[in-house]
Amino acid sequence: MDTGYTYVIGMDMGTTNIKAIILRSDGAVAAEASLPSTHYNPGLNMQEQDAEEWWEHVCWILKSVTAQLRPQERAKIGGICISSHTVSMLPVSEDGKPLYKALTVQDGRSYEEMEEIVEKVGPDRFVQIVGGQPAVAFLPWKILWYKRHEPELFAKTRWYLQASSFINYRLTGVLMTDLDQALRTQCLDRETLEWSEEISRAMGVDLKHFLPEIKLAQEVIGKVTPWAAEKTGLPEGMPVLGGCSDALAAMVAIGLSRLGECGESSGTTSLIFAGTNVKSPADVPVVTRPCPIENMPWIFDAPIQASGSALKWFIDTLAGPEKEEAERRGVNIYAYLNELALKAEAGSGGLLFFPYLQGERAPLWNNYASGMFIGMRLEMTRAQLTRSIFEGTAYALRHVIETLKAEGAGIDCLRICGGGARSRTWNRIKASVLNLPVYVLNQTSGDVPVGDALMAADVTGMFASLEEGVAKSIKVDEVIQPDPEWVKVYDKLYPYYVKMYQSLDQDLKSLDGTLEEIRAAF
């Protein structure tokens, strides 16, 4: 279908940066720009961002990318799709003005409210309603905390928005939220796709009043207003899509196009995706969500809390000698660790690293899991210590993937992108721990705004289908096959990784409670 459009815009409101790209009809990125977002930490476990700063940065970024096109090219921009970090809580007034800084997904101040709401609903019933395990990142308890601690502002609040829906409102004047992020709030009934009355009663807050109408990710919700066009440089009247979470956009940017493919967006944390024909039950540790890809009705979306951050923690706290040696050689510390890890044998002499430095999300879903080394001996080398970090994060990945397989996902390869994909050592270890070929994507692939742009291109008809857009835009740099000898070692050691954590789970939970008592007393 030839619509005459040769460009689309994808934008991601990330927790660290806001970035936009313009994608061309040949699959190339024609322009890009980004700005960092400011984080505010007013207290323990608190993280906030300023929505007015979001808007200022969005205006600058959009003016920057559109200025990189000639005027006649700007007229051929077919639409924009925006994703964002989720779940945030941004309270706004009747006319959409922010009343309080947005509580981000990393904000953990509402733990007590979470426990209270889940207890009122009932833990099993809560999971049945929302289709996932409760965690402090989600929305109901953030709203309840706000009601209790900012009652005057709560009384003035009309809507609670996500970052992308706030920007969509500024662009179009339409108040909405997208289905993907609505499913992630833990406010939506997974079966009826309506805001849950049971959770509303437990909160003492009418969610149907405060949460806006739900639109589909690839639904055109409105058009750029004259005011927004002047502020952003976008063409007046340009279509704006409903958008989605950064997780869903990352999944599209990884280039999943068929059942059997699994994707990892490997960064500070990791996002794991795999398609399935079957909707998972509500009480499993991984959850299916609706998927925009043709012939892939459902997608498993399973986050790992610490992957790249585990390696950074090792560098910051334990890798002093390695940093000195890397500096002496004049090489990057990450490159040196990749080299050093290969000097150790597969299995690191039995040293197991558990990367639960911030608790764990999938498939454990608890905040009390702790990072651990098990199997240290006097003869342990620093190469083994280094390799165990790579292996432990790969075991965590296997734990997720085996859970996905048990719930119906057929997985025959791993497509990987992000900062972690630049480590060939890590990729070789992952391929061997999983016993799957690893497809390493190019630098552009996996960039979240590319996923947004591909969805916009599909809707506006710039590509005949999403699959065509993926084929033009997402490229594989290398395919890494499992090492047969390493596979044998990892298949013998991986069961200990799972069993040892299971044996310690309740003790770690009790220890976490004891530490809370100590902190309260002293």
Image (spheres, rainbow, N blue to C red):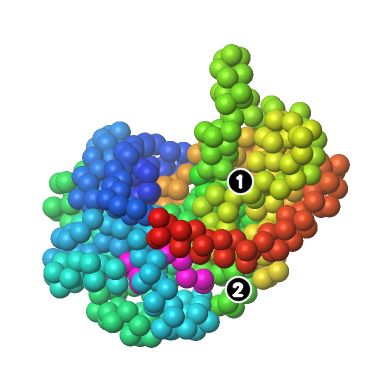
> What amino acid is labelled 1 in the image?
Ile
Where is residue 87 shown, x and y percent of the image? Answer: 38, 61
Q: Which one is in front, 209 or 167?
A: 209
Q: Residue at x 58, y 77 (%)?
A: 283
The residue where tag 1 is placed is 416
The answer to whether residue 520 is left or right of residue 504 is left
Q: Residues within 10 Å of mark 1 (few under 14, many from 20)?
A: many
Q: Which one is in front, 323 or 72?
A: 323
Q: Which one is in front, 16 or 140?
A: 140
> What amino acid is labelled 2 in the image?
Val
Where is residue 415 shown, x and y percent of the image? Answer: 63, 48
Where is residue 522 shown, x and y percent of the image? Answer: 40, 55
How much space separates mark 1 and mark 2, taking CA atoms? 25 Å
Q: Is residue 147 above or below residue 168?
A: below
The residue where tag 2 is placed is 284
Q: Is residue 302 visible?
A: no
Where is residue 493 shown, x and y percent of the image? Answer: 80, 51
Q: Residue at x 69, y 55 (%)?
A: 398
The magenta-colored residue range is 132-143
Q: Residue at x 55, y 49 (%)?
A: 357
Assess whether mark 2 and mark 1 are in contact (beta carbons under 8 angstroms). Answer: no
Q: Residues within 10 Å of mark 2 (few under 14, many from 20)?
A: some
Q: Is residue 338 above or below residue 219?
A: above
Q: Residue at x 56, y 43 (%)?
A: 310
Would you say residue 138 sits in the magenta stretch? yes
Would you say residue 102 sits in the magenta stretch? no
| Helix, strand or loop status at disc 2 | loop
Q: Is residue 124 visible?
A: yes
Q: Quadrant of the N terminus?
A: bottom left
